[in-house]
Image (spheres, rainbow, N blue to C red):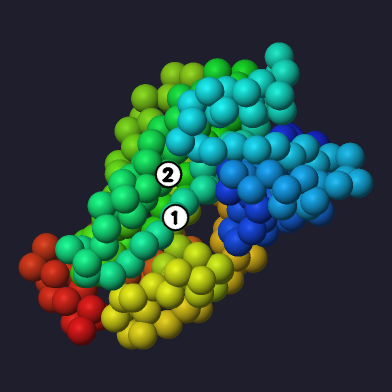
Amino acid sequence: MNTFRRRPGSILVSGAARGIGRATAELFLARGWRVGLYDVDGAAVTEAAAGRPDAVAGVLDVRDAAQWRAALQGFCGDGGLDVLVNNAGVLSSGPFTGTDLDSHRRMVDVNVTGVVNGAAAGHPFLRRSPRGLLLNLCSASALYGQPTLATYGATKAAVKSLTEALDLEWRRDGVRVRSLVPLFVATGMVSRDGVHAASVASLGVRLTADDVAVAAWKVVHERRRPLASPHRPVGRQTKALAALSAVTPDWANRIVVSRLAR
């Protein structure tokens, strides 16, 4: 028997103006859910939600805890929230010492502090739902540190660890915590920012934002598996890399990553 009731639920997505966030919001809207589209680009999410009664849009800079609280209160009111997707993220790539400190700091502020803010503000609403789920966007970059993606990978490793800790800590509240772990995804963040990592050339960009959105849908509707990992690799490449890193010694993972990064 499926864990969830079959009625549509409510979901709030950060970074919903484009890319994975937008694709996820669109999928859940198409399937009858009430969807909150929140992004630092308020104009983009307002346009996306226009004329759609189940869509609510708002401005959200995930680095600002007060904006998180206002967004959740505005979307949920005194009710609960079924799913919160911590999707907003930024990426800068290139040699570590060739990347300015403001770029390093921005990745930490958005990718780590933003996720912590979302989790903290979202918890009271998620625990009011019988199917509360916090879904964090992680990355295969968290599996092992990659040259030219050092700080980005470190931020995603933090998200991975936070997911594991909160999934255990929030069990008593009935709130599940999961992460999606894709490899490179064909979004504006990859093409616009021009990811300077040799692993992109080695592995290619084989996932779309829609692929990740479908994975999010599956996680929301999966059966409860108490002993299973909270992480969900997205795509065959990521599943293979995750399986390899889980069973091979550290020195072997180091060799694999170093060869991919050539």
SS category of the residue bearing label 1: loop
Query: Label 1: which residue?
Result: 90
Q: Is residue 12 left or right of residue 31?
A: left
Question: In the image, what residue occupies the spot 49% across and 19% down?
Answer: 173
SS category of the residue bearing label 2: helix
State the residue in front, 214 or 14.
Answer: 14
The percent position of residue 117, horizontal first and vertical second, equals 45, 30
Q: Is 11 drawn above or below residue 180 in the view shown?
A: above
Query: Label 2: which residue?
Result: 110
State the residue in front, 22 or 44.
Answer: 44
Q: Are marks 1 and 2 in contact (CB under 8 Å)?
A: yes
> Image quadrant for the N terminus?
top right
The percent position of residue 262, horizontal first and vertical second, equals 20, 84
| Residue 172 seen in this snapshot | yes
Furthest residue toward top: 78
Q: Is residue 99 left or right of residue 156?
A: left
Indicate which disc residue 253 carries.
none
Q: Residues within 10 Å of mark 2 (few under 14, many from 20)?
A: many
Give the residue type at disc 1.
Val
